[in-house]
Image (spheres, rainbow, N blue to C red):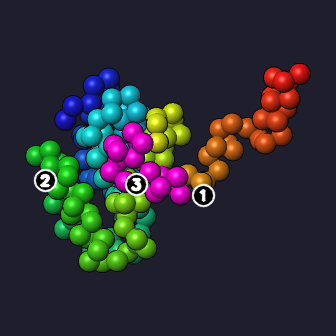
Amino acid sequence: MNMENTDADPVKELRCALEKKDAYRLRELSEQCVDIAFITQSRDAINVGIISYAFHKIFLKGHYHSQFTELLECSKKKLDCGSLESIIEDIKQFDKKNGFFQGNVVKKARIKIGARLYTRGMSLSKAAELVAVNVSDILKYSGGTQVSENMAGSVKARLDVARRIFE
């Protein structure tokens, strides 16, 4: 897996978090992979981020733990072989078969990661290309969040800055 400029190996981190069924570590790892992907534009970083986020969501559904044991074990074996795309396909099939989520947990992960890349400053089209979703999917998700408000300050604060600029 080629993810330069990283101290830890995200695949090893993913395997460890899966072993421990650590939903919160998986969420953190997904964020870290977004940071890596922003810098390197690595498809592997994107895939680890997608897998991490999807398993985070699956693990949060605690009452279904007995149903995802096979998926988990298979995924850990495939991680050892570097078969990230295959794990993503397995998660899609698992989701489709069990219907735990409205929509598709993998697509949701792709959109969320794409939106994170976009909010960090990557162009919308490049973010959409990297995560393999439509630009409109990212825009729809980003428009439903308050990320731009939180990052840029309140509307009043932005208006004050604009007024000072044009004085």
Q: Nearer the viewer, mark 1 or mark 3?
A: 3
Query: Quadrant where the N terminus lies?
Result: top left
Q: In this view, does 4 lie to the left or right of 160?
A: left
| Whether residue 135 is situated above or below residue 32 in the rendered picture | below
Depth check: 17 or 146 in front? Answer: 146
* Total tally of numbered discs in the picture: 3
The answer for how far apart the CA atoms under marks 1 and 3 are is: 16 Å
For the residue marked with disc 2, what is the amino acid? Lys
In the rendered structure, find residue 144 and report the number of the disc placed on it: 1
Identify the amino acid type marked 1: Gly
Majority SS type along the magenta span: helix
Q: What label sits on residue 124 in the rendered view?
A: none
Most extreme residue toward the bottom, as rendered? 98
From which residue to which does the magenta span run? Answer: 125-140
Determine whether the residue tagged by mark 1 lies in a helix, strand or loop. loop
> Would residue 17 be visible to someone looking at this image?
no
Between circles 2 and 1, the one closer to the viewer is 1
| Residue 77's disc number | 2
Q: Quadrant of residue 163?
A: top right
Residue 134, labelled with which disc? 3
Q: Position of residue 70 (x, y in %)?
A: 19, 68
Residues at discs 3 and 2 in contact (Cβ within 8 Å): no
N-term mark: 2 or 1: 2
Q: CB atoms at circles 2 and 1 under 8 Å apart?
A: no
Q: Nearer the viewer, residue 149 or 67?
A: 149
- Dot 2 surroundings within 10 Å: few (below 14), some, or many (20 or more)? few
Q: Residue at x 27, y 30 (%)?
A: 3
Above or below residue 92? Residue 42 is: above
